[in-house]
Amino acid sequence: MADRKPKAASRALKRLGPLGVVVTIVVVLELIWHPISFFVFDRKYDNVPQYSKREAYATTERAQQILDAFTRPTGTDAIVTSRCGGKAGIEFQYGTHELRVQLEEHLRVRGIWYTGREWTLDGVPVELRNV
């Protein structure tokens, strides 16, 4: 009778199978919800990135009107950023974590926080950047 021991390659594939499944799940989650990059940007760089779809962005004029009507803490700056072929979002810039906290308190009044995802201000996507 022939020896029926599994080949070395077969054993290696069996060992890598669960790891492959885990890696695939992590890659798919990152592509859909960006949990890893969001965590890195938020914790390491003190930023809140923007992952909105193209439809979420506004015209440059609308974004500027919303920005002009928004009261922000002293020490923060804000600009309208061009995105997605003529559409625009809003970027707030600050120098310290304390200013970010103050800015987020202001955003809670008129903005919406989508947990672990992004801010919007009157429906326009917002990015927070520590500069």
Image (spheres, grey):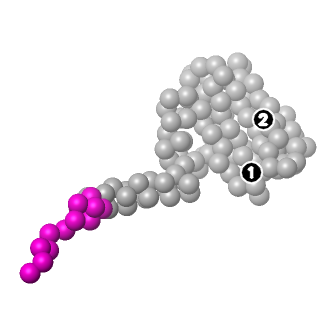
Instruction: From the top left corner, tell me how far across and down residue 18 is, in percent.
Output: 31, 60
Task: Work out whether residue 119 can be spotted.
Answer: no
Instruction: From the top left corner, tell me how far across and down residue 71 is, in percent.
Output: 76, 31
Q: Specify the quadrant that holds the N terminus.
A: bottom left
The image quarter in which residue 55 lies: bottom right
**What whole-number distance in Å separates the C-alpha atoms at marks 2 and 1?**
13 Å
Assess disc 2: are there few (<14), some (14-19) or many (≥20) residues with their C-alpha within 10 Å of its C-alpha: some
Furthest toward the front, the residue is 1
Assess disc 1: are there few (<14), some (14-19) or many (≥20) residues with their C-alpha within 10 Å of its C-alpha: some
Instruction: Give 59 or 5, whichever is nearer the viewer.
Output: 5
Q: Specify the quadrant that holds the C terminus.
A: top right
Task: Work out whether residue 88 can be spotted.
Answer: yes
In the rendered structure, which amino acid carries the disc numbered 1? Answer: Gly
Furthest toward the bottom, the residue is 1
Furthest toward the left, the residue is 1
Residue placed under numbered mark 2 in the picture = 70
Instruction: From the top left corner, tell me how far across and down residue 58 is, in percent.
Output: 82, 50
Residue depicted at x 53% and y 42%: 37
Residue placed under numbered mark 1 in the picture = 123
In magenta, the rendered stretch is 1-13
Element assignment for label 1: loop
Residue depicted at x 31% and y 57%: 16
Residue depicted at x 12% and y 78%: 2
Instruction: Give 101 or 44, whichever is nearer the viewer.
Output: 44
Q: Is residue 89 left or right of residue 9?
A: right
Residue depicted at x 50% and y 58%: 28
Instruction: Give 93 or 111, whichever is nearer the viewer.
Output: 93
